[in-house]
Image (cartoon, rainbow, N blue to C red):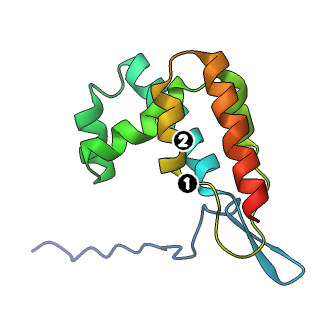
Amino acid sequence: MKAARTREWTIDLTRRGRKNVCLQEDTQAVRVPRLARLMALAIRFDGLLRSGAIIDQAQLARLGKVSRARISQILNLIHLAPDIQEQLLFLPPIHHGRERLHLADLQPLCRQWDWFRQRQMWQALRQRLSKSS
């Protein structure tokens, strides 16, 4: 007769990650703007597609459990001029309230292939947002 074997595991159930998303500053939550996260995601997705690690956008959608249309919207950010992409990546953190700039606001810019025209549209959008606040 064989002796029974016992196995023991130690599982760490503390939450990890997201350390850079919510930071405490003067007892107020500080959030990284959603568009900054989406821009970083678009760059990451583009890299995965170019390297061949991911076959196509449909596979990205399945892995992310989102629609293919949503993946297209995110990947459209890659079509922005590099300086606009940089500004999106370094948007100031949000201390309270809602975000004023949304992905839908940028879709018309993404459809514009001329970077000079994109920059004009970006400046107009920023001015419109600064006047409304």
Q: Which residue is mark 1?
A: 102
Which residue is the site of mark 2? 106
Residue type at mark 1: give it.
Answer: His
- Residue 29 shows in the view: yes
Q: Residue at x 23, y 36 (%)?
A: 58
Residue 60 vertical position relative to residue 98 in the rendered view, above or below: above
| Identity of the residue drawn at 45% across and 32% down | 76
| Residue 49 in which image quadrant | top left
Residue 22 vs residue 94, the one in the foreground: 94
The foreground one among 117 and 102 is: 117
Point out which mark residue 35 bears: none
Question: Identity of the amino acid at label 2?
Answer: Leu
- Quadrant assignment for the N terminus: bottom left
Q: Position of residue 99 (x, y in %)?
A: 64, 64
Furthest residue in direction bottom, as rendered: 27
* Residue 17, quarter of picture: bottom right
Q: Quadrant of residue 72?
A: top left
Q: Secondary structure at mark 1?
A: loop
Q: Is residue 104 left or right of residue 92?
A: left
Q: Viewed as shown, does residue 23 lie left or right of 82?
A: right
Residue at x 52%, y 27% (from the top left corner) = 78
Between residue 133 and residue 55, name the one nearer to us. 133
**Are the residues flagged by discs 2 and 1 in contact, CB closer than 8 Å?**
yes
Q: Residues within 10 Å of mark 2 (few under 14, many from 20)?
A: some
Rounded to the nearest angstrom, the CA distance separating label 2 from label 1 is: 7 Å
Nearest the eye: 49 or 53: 49
Picture coordinates of residue 5, whole percent (x, y): 27, 73
Report if residue 44 is visible in the image: no
Where residue 108 appears, as percent x and y from the top left, is 48, 36
* Quarter of the C terminus within the rendering: bottom right
